[in-house]
């Protein structure tokens, strides 16, 4: 039995969670993403790096169909999560986004209490049958975001009153509260100081055990610290994708090498 | 020299000063503008400013003070026997002014020579002035003629003095500034100071005017309360002014008027707040750019319609419609003028106030809030209800209270829509009236500013002012207190 489980786990680790095939994104006349093909593994942290405007955030926003909220955006190609095409007609983007959580560049807690911020997702999706269950979800999510000890005595205080790092962890707790399978993070530390960044990075390590995490970052050291796989984007194309160690020590493409050695970007 | 010509000469002097100032500055820098402390135009503007500003200020003050002073001097030579009280003196002085003005006009038109005007006799002056279009109330007597002649003399002397003083002042400013121009003179800074003074002046005028309005209302209101008990005014439920102006037959209780005001405003808000808010949400969250581009200005056109037009709409369309469709069949009354009519039409008028302001406020909620909510799998209406409206609530409340202030102060729609009968009733299909309507009716026609029936208008106005002021303060408080600190 035990052996079987080991095998399963290995396979599980390599299991493809998100698969993109021939993805193109257009903003009006701008061709923002050009033919991206990528397999993102489950229970792993995948980092997207690349210079500003290279399309990494745009691609990230395709994975939970956030680009649908931008009227001029147009997406071609297929993105599959667990083998299911998320751009299929039958898929409800609202349901999808509960399954694919997102954390944004700037901490954006709602102007509500800390409790209500975390309870927001479970409430709109009806995940809790009663107040006790909701309390539990809130506590679990805040614990997972490593924020519980700091805020447990002031759950009714406004979320906007927390420090920047706490706010970002609150946003992570909020995203975790709907029990997503994938967590997308769009430069989650770019507005944080080094200490808060460290806390969030540690958190990403822990989150990896439960979720498939995709993180967009400008910091190459961050990518090397937190991720197992790294994809390098350049001018809308995905240039290189592989083990993080490989990408940073032995890039195959000249553009990747230029970027990580600091010659461009 | 007439004031117009004085203005023209000041302007010419300023223009010449500007040119000379600029030239002198350039000359002092040897023709190289880079050597100057300020741009060459600042030197010119500086001269123009010092020529015009003091001269114009003194001219303005002079124009106000001169008639007052001369009138005082002339009034003192009128024998006490010629009038009984201050009112009679006022009438007499009005005649003096008219005769003096008539004589001046006659000279200007050539009907009389200066000498003839000076020697004019009282006997046929009225007829002669009438010939050139100046009507004098009664036959001109010698007292008035004498005073008028005195008036003319003083006036012409004062005019001459004014011309001389103003021109000297302008010239002094001219010479003073031009002489100070030099390569290192900080003309730019002194122009900056002038701009500052101008801005301070503009803001002070607004504040002082408000203060003046309040004070004038306050004094008249105190007059009123000396003649009519305040407790009756605030707590009596009857509004029944007698227009005889004699005796204490009037009942001047504000309650029926306040009731009408609040009732109509309430209905207006019940109409305008939901419609306005929903329109704002649609425009800012759902509508695409093109639709919003023409729908929003179109909605704002509603705000540009004069309220009297709304009043007509209430009078000829909404009022009869409501009476025939609802009030009469249900036995609620058969008056076309009703609280409901005025409230509905006023509500329509207020829609753009609520919608336009709320739309701006909703648009100001950062996109990050929407992203955060959509990212958690919320639908659009969930996002609006649970994130956007709460975030924008202080501003929306502010917009609503602003609309409430408008509703409370509205007059025309009420006159035509709700009638002028002061009454306390819960039936919205009865005619009632508001504070503002009664202010108008107490002040129109032949009014006597010493009777409580007229003065009550000021007490009503002040009460209304205090109420709307309170609402505005409340709005500000709510906005400040509950403003969410989103980035």
Image (tube, coloured by chain):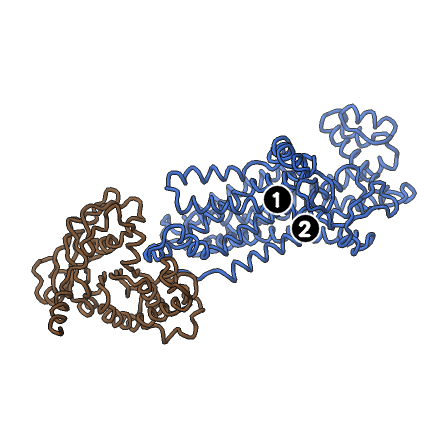
* Place of residue B400 in the rendered image (x, y in percent of width and height, measured from the top left): 55, 50
- Of residues A109 and B438, which is closer to you in this image? A109
- Which one of the lettered chains is coloured blue? B
Image-based side of B178 in relation to A120, left or right: right
Question: Tag on residue B167?
Answer: 1
Give chain A's shade.
Answer: brown
Q: Could you tell me which quadrant the C terminus of chain B lies in?
A: bottom left
User: Taking the image as drawn, is residue A160 in sight?
Assistant: no
Task: Determine which quarter of the picture holds residue A253.
Answer: bottom left
User: Taking the image as drawn, is residue B270 in sight?
Assistant: yes
Q: Give me the chain letter of mark 2.
A: B
Q: Pointer 2 and pointer 1: residues touching (CB < 8 Å)?
A: no
* Above-or-below relation of A9 to B357: below
Task: Determine which quarter of the picture holds residue B98.
Answer: top right
Circle 2 crowding by C-alpha within 10 Å: few under 14, some 14–19, many from 20: some
- The residue tagged 2 is B464
Name which of mark 2 and mark 1 comes first in the sequence.
Answer: 1
* Place of residue B295 in the rendered image (x, y in percent of width and height, measured from the top left): 44, 38
């Amino acid at each position: 039995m035990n052996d079987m489980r080991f095998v399963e786990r290995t396979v599980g680790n390599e299991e493809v969670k998100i698969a993109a095939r021939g993805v193109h994104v257009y903003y009006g006349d701008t061709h923002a993403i050009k033919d991206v093909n990528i397999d993102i593994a489950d229970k792993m942290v995948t980092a997207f790096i690349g210079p500003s405007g290279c399309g990494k955030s745009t691609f990230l926003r395709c994975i939970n169909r956030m680009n649908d909220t931008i009227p001029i955006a147009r997406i071609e190609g297929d993105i599959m999560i667990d083998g299911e095409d998320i751009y299929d007609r039958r898929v409800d983007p609202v349901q999808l986004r509960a399954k694919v959580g997102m954390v944004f560049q700037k901490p954006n807690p709602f102007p509500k209490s800390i409790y209500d911020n975390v309870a927001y997702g479970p409430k709109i999706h009806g995940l809790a049958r009663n107040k006790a269950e909701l309390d539990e979800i809130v506590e679990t999510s805040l614990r997972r975001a490593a924020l519980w000890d700091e805020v447990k005595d002031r759950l009714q205080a406004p979320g906007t009153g927390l420090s920047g790092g706490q706010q970002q962890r609150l946003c992570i707790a909020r995203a975790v509260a709907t029990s997503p399978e994938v967590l997308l993070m769009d430069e989650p530390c770019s507005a944080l100081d080094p200490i808060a960044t460290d806390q969030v990075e540690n958190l990403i390590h822990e989150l990896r055990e439960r979720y498939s995490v995709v993180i967009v970052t400008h910091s190459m050291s961050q990518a090397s610290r937190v991720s197992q796989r790294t994809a390098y984007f350049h001018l809308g194309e995905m240039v290189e994708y592989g083990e993080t160690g490989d990408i940073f020590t032995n890039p195959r493409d000249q553009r990747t090498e230029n970027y990580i050695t600091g010659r461009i970007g | 020299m007439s004031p117009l010509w004085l203005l023209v000469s000041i302007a010419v002097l300023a223009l010449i000063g500007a040119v000379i100032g600029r030239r002198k500055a350039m000359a002092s820098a040897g023709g190289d503008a880079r050597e100057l402390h300020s741009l060459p135009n600042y030197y010119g503007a500086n001269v123009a400013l010092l020529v015009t500003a003091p001269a114009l200020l003194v001219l303005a003050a002079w124009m106000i003070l001169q008639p007052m002073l001369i009138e005082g001097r002339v009034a003192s030579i009128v024998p006490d026997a010629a009038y009984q009280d201050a009112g009679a003196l006022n009438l007499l002085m009005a005649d003096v002014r008219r005769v003096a003005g008539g004589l001046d006009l006659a000279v200007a038109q050539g009907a009389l020579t200066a000498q003839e005007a000076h020697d004019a006799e009282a006997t046929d002056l009225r007829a002669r002035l009438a010939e050139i279009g100046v009507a004098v109330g009664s036959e001109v007597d010698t007292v008035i003629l004498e005073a008028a002649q005195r008036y003319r003399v003083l006036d012409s002397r004062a005019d001459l003095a004014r011309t001389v003083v103003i021109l000297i002042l302008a010239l002094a400013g001219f010479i003073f500034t031009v002489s100070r121009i030099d390569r290192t003179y900080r003309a730019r800074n002194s122009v900056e100071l002038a701009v500052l003074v101008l801005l301070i002046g503009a803001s002070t005028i607004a504040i002082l005017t408000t203060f003046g309005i309040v004070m004038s209302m306050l004094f008249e209101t105190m007059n009123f309360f000396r003649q009519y008990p305040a407790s009756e005014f605030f707590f009596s439920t009857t509004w029944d002014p007698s227009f005889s102006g004699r005796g204490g037959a009037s009942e001047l209780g504000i309650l029926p008027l306040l009731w009408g005001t609040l009732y109509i405003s309430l209905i207006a808000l019940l109409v305008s707040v939901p419609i306005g808010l929903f329109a704002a949400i649609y425009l800012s969250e759902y509508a695409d750019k093109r639709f919003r581009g023409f729908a929003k200005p179109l909605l704002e056109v509603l705000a540009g319609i004069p309220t009297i037009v709304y009043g007509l709409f209430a009078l000829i369309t909404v009022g009869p419609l409501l009476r025939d469709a609802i009030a009469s069949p249900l036995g609620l009354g058969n008056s076309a003028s009703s609280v409901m009519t005025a409230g509905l039409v006023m509500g329509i008028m207020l829609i753009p106030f609520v919608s336009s302001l709320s739309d701006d406020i909703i648009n100001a909620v950062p996109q990050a809030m929407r992203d955060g909510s959509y990212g958690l799998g919320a639908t659009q209406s969930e996002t609006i209800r649970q994130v956007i409206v709460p975030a924008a609530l202080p501003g929306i409340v502010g917009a609503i209270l602003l609309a409430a202030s408008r509703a409370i102060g509205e007059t025309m729609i009420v006159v035509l829509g709700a009638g002028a009968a002061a009454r306390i009733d819960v039936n919205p299909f009865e005619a009632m009236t508001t504070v503002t309507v009664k202010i108008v009716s107490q002040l129109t026609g032949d009014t006597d500013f010493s009777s409580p029936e007229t003065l009550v208008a000021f007490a009503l106005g002040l009460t209304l002012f205090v109420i709307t002021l309170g609402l505005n303060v409340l709005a500000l408080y709510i906005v400040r207190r509950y403003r969410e600190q989103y980035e």
